[in-house]
Amino acid sequence: MPLRPDLAVIADLILPEARVLDLGCGEGDLLAHLQTQKQVNGYGLDVDAANIRTCLQKGVNVIEQDLDEGLDNFESNSFDMVVMTETLQSVRAPDHLLQEMLRIGEECIVTFPNFGHWRCRMQLATLGRMPVSSHIPHSWFNTPNIHLCTFKDFEQLCADLSLRIIERRVVDQRYSERPFADWLPNLLGPIAFYRLGRRGAA
């Protein structure tokens, strides 16, 4: 079965034989692919019992853990890469979690929807209502997104936390890269993939 497009973008950013931790790993598709195709040593975290069972059936190492409870059970520098896919906006303390990701990992990959995208701005300006779109599909009353941010917000947070942005890939709703989106990413990019490292690292 082909890898989901967003997970394929992440897989492309991970080196062979890396030690990988996937936060909110779901059914373990990314780790299963990386174990087969890149021989990674991977672990996933998830809170959903059905997801955990599916991970185990696929041979993926998985731990039941709530991200809001922190990552204190992992030693510093335990992983080469820590991954979190479209979850940052739904955790209680995204700033602390980012710091923890780069405490236990040499690098991390974070993806999230951009609430500064032109469609979101247009809905607010013309309808006066909170945006709903293919990449932000929930209504205001049932959304899991408790910390809404734009790419500019996120990049400012990285600067404030002294986190280094190694790479940014801006994609459309189908997770395809579009050159024009890099011209005005905060306006034209619905979703971004950020690869981060510690400030001052080589």
Image (cartoon, helix red, strand yellow):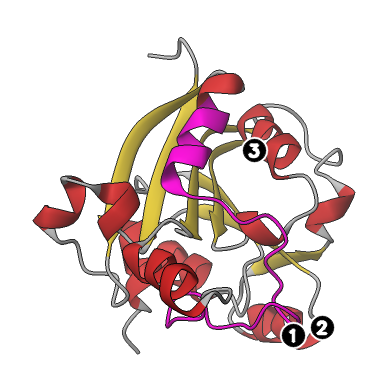
Q: Nearer the viewer, mark 3 or mark 1?
A: 3
Q: CA distance from mark 2 to mark 1?
A: 6 Å
Q: Residue 59, percent across and down? A: 61, 75
The kind of secondary structure element at disc 1 is helix
Q: Nearer the viewer, mark 3 or mark 2?
A: 3
- Amino acid on which the number 2 mark rests in the picture: Ala
Task: Let me know if residue 13 appears in the view.
Answer: yes
Residue extent of the magenta highlight: 132-158
- Amino acid on which the number 3 mark rests in the picture: Leu
The residue that disc 2 covers is: 49
**Residue 112 appears left or right of 192:** right
**Mark 3 or mark 2, earlier in chain:** 2
Looking at this view, is 45 or 134 the one in front? 134
| Other residues around mark 1 within 10 Å, as few (<14) / some (14–19) / many (≥20) | some
Q: Quadrant of the C terminus?
A: top left
Decide: is 65 above or below 128.
Answer: above
- The residue under the point 79% across, 55% down is 67
Looking at this view, is 156 or 121 the one in front? 121
- Amino acid on which the number 1 mark rests in the picture: Arg
The residue that disc 3 covers is: 98
- Asked if the residues shown at circle 3 and circle 1 are in contact, with their CB atoms under 8 angstroms apart, the answer is no
Within the magenta stretch, is there residue 103? Answer: no
- Asked if the residues shown at circle 2 and circle 1 are in contact, with their CB atoms under 8 angstroms apart, the answer is yes
The kind of secondary structure element at disc 3 is helix
The kind of secondary structure element at disc 2 is helix
Q: Residue 145, percent across and down? A: 67, 66
Q: CA distance from mark 3 to mark 2?
A: 25 Å
The residue that disc 1 covers is: 53
| Other residues around mark 2 within 10 Å, as few (<14) / some (14–19) / many (≥20) | few
